[in-house]
Structure formats: C-alpha cells, structure tokens
Image: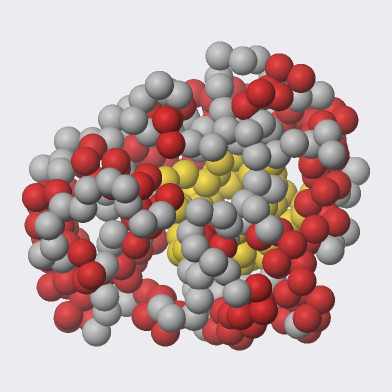
Amino acid sequence: MVERYELVPGYTMSRLLKGGWHLAGGHGEVDRQQAIDDMAAFVEAGITSFDCADHYTGVEELIGDFSAAYPELGKRIEIHTKFVPDYDRLTSCDRAYVENIIDRSLKRLRVDRLDLVQFHWWNYAVPGYVEAMQVLDELRKAGKIRLLGLTNFNTATTREIVEAGVPVAATQVQYSVLDSRPERGLVDFCRAHKIGLLCYGTLAGGFMSEAWLGKPEPQEPLENRSLTKYKLIIEDFGGWGLFQELLGVLRDIGHAHGAGIGQVATRYVLDRPGVAGAIVGATSTKHLAGNLRIDTMRLSDAERARLDAVLAKRSGPPGDCYDIERDKTGRHGRIMRYNQNDGRH
C-alpha cells in the first residue's frame, strides 16, 4: 500500500495524490468513462487521495460520477478540492458567493461534507482574504467542510490567516527539484504550526521525464498548458542546459532503483521536511506502476548529495511561493486564467 500521512488526528491521506488539473480543459480530449475507470485503478492501488478544484472544468463532476459508479471504492477516497474566487469577484467575495460555490462543489462531488477545501486569493492588494477564510471556517463549523487549507499563499499571508485564528491543516504549493521557494520561510512556519505541505509540480507538467533528456530546447507554442507553465519555471531555474544536467543525474539515480526520472524527482520532494504529500498529474493509468515505485524507493545520502550539487547551481525561481505568478503583466501571470468560477449561476 502507498504511504499514508496523518494530516490531523483521525484524518489520513495517501502521500501520493491523484491530481485532477490534467483532466480539465487545455490538456487534450478526455474519455470520460476511461477517466472514471482509471480512478478505480488508482484507489485499488492505494492512491486514495484525489486533488481537484472548483475551477478545474468538469473534474469535480468526474469524481462524483466515479463515486456513483464505484460506490465501495468511493467510500475509500479523500477528496481535496479548492475554493478559488474569480479575480473580478474579489471585491465582492461575500458570504453568499462563498457558500454558493461550496454548495456547488458538494453537489458536483455528491457528498455531504468536503474533506479538505484549499483557498486561493489572486491579489493580496485586494482586502478580504482573511474574511473569506473566516466564512469558510463558519461553513466548517456548520458541517459542510471537514478541514481547511490554503493554496499558493506565501509565508506572510499564511501567517496572517493563522494568526486570525483560522485552523489551517494544509497548504498546497509548487515545490519540486526545480522550485525551492517554499524553503524561504514557509516550510519552517508550517512545521511550527503543524500545517502539512501538499506539493504540486514535481513532474513539471511532463518535462521531468526521459522523453526530454538530450532533446533540444522546445519553442512556443507548446503542446498544452502544463508544458507552457513549467517551461517558464525551467527558464527561471537556470535554463535548458542546467535542466539537462539535472535530468541526467535523476536518470542515473533512477537506474539504481529501477525507477524513472519523474519518480526520483517526486521521491526527493516527499523526503523534504514538512511535506505531507505530492500531487501527481495523471490522465490515465499509463504511469501508475511507475508511480507506485516512488513509495518503496529510498534515496541514499550520496544520491541526495549528487542532486544537491546540481541544485546549488540554480538561479531561481525568485521570491516566495507564487509571488511571480501574481504579477498579471509578467511572464508567469500572463498565462493564467483568472475568471473561471462564476458563482452567480
């Protein structure tokens, strides 16, 4: 069985989480029935925690349909969704708006209570994120939500919410061999306050694989939204040349474990202090067997030292968690979709 992590007393999750973003728009056609059947295979393999969001087009409904099609397996899953108010609604993110979207997620997922709701706020310059989180806490107390979390909050705003008295069980951030921004304050803060880190980006949208080793640097337009996003992260990390050096070391380490580049990269993140789990994007069961190797793999001190020697050469990404992505005029911000959650309907 896949490793499990106790996020709070009485609530455990699989340390590998099945990501849902790749089943949303912008990643190619999705065979709905096959996606539902694939979810069953993941649960049977021990990956029982699913990550989704209110603005991942159609994904909450897919998980709800899975639970209806496989009721016994549906009882075994932990569903982590998100509340992401539209950028254009931040100034009017009142209780009715919040509760409407939470009720919509409950209906889509076909559940009476959401296991974990992770909250995102696009623009810190617009006040209201603490108040929105307090509304979510009221809904938690009312029984609609079990646990509260954050997603893509930096250290300062995470502290602000915690100090407002809101119980935060987890925070989802981009954390990988390419992106060490959580180590600039957030990791230590979360460990001190028993907040588990749920990490995405360990596979860099598919770049972290043998398919890209030794290949020339790709040029835009790229195949999908994930590759577009993580190509920017690779550029910030230190460029294509340093990325190729990293892939080579990951490949060599993987050979010693009968594992692939992406599995070694994910294991490295799971071993970082404070990490509760890693979200692995998957559109099918194609890499399921490989992902299960992550669970049994253990990196030696010498292998970690080889990786650290390459990582010491990186130049970025700069700043705290998600700071560069919040700049709507910047390279990262320009590719974001800011309004996908019209709670008025």
Image: 105 above or below 120: below
The x, y position of residue 330, in whole percent, is 36, 25
Residue at screen point 66% across, 31% down: 86
Residue at screen point 42% across, 46% down: 174
Of 141 and 113, nearer the camera is: 113
Q: Can residue 274 be seen here? A: no
Would residue 211 appear left or right of 202 to someone viewing this image? left
Of 5 and 89, nearer the camera is: 89
Quadrant including the C terminus: top right
Of 52 and 300, nearer the camera is: 52
Would residue 137 appear left or right of 221 to someone viewing this image? right
Would residue 142 appear left or right of 79 to someone viewing this image? right
The x, y position of residue 75, in whole percent, is 77, 75
Locate residue 46: give its quadrant: bottom right
Return the residue found at the far right: 142
Q: Can residue 342 be seen here? A: yes
Residue at screen point 84% across, 62% down: 111
Of 132 and 190, nearer the camera is: 132
Residue at screen point 51% across, 70% down: 283
The x, y position of residue 286, in whole percent, is 43, 81
Image: 76 above or below 145: below
The x, y position of residue 183, in whole percent, is 34, 39
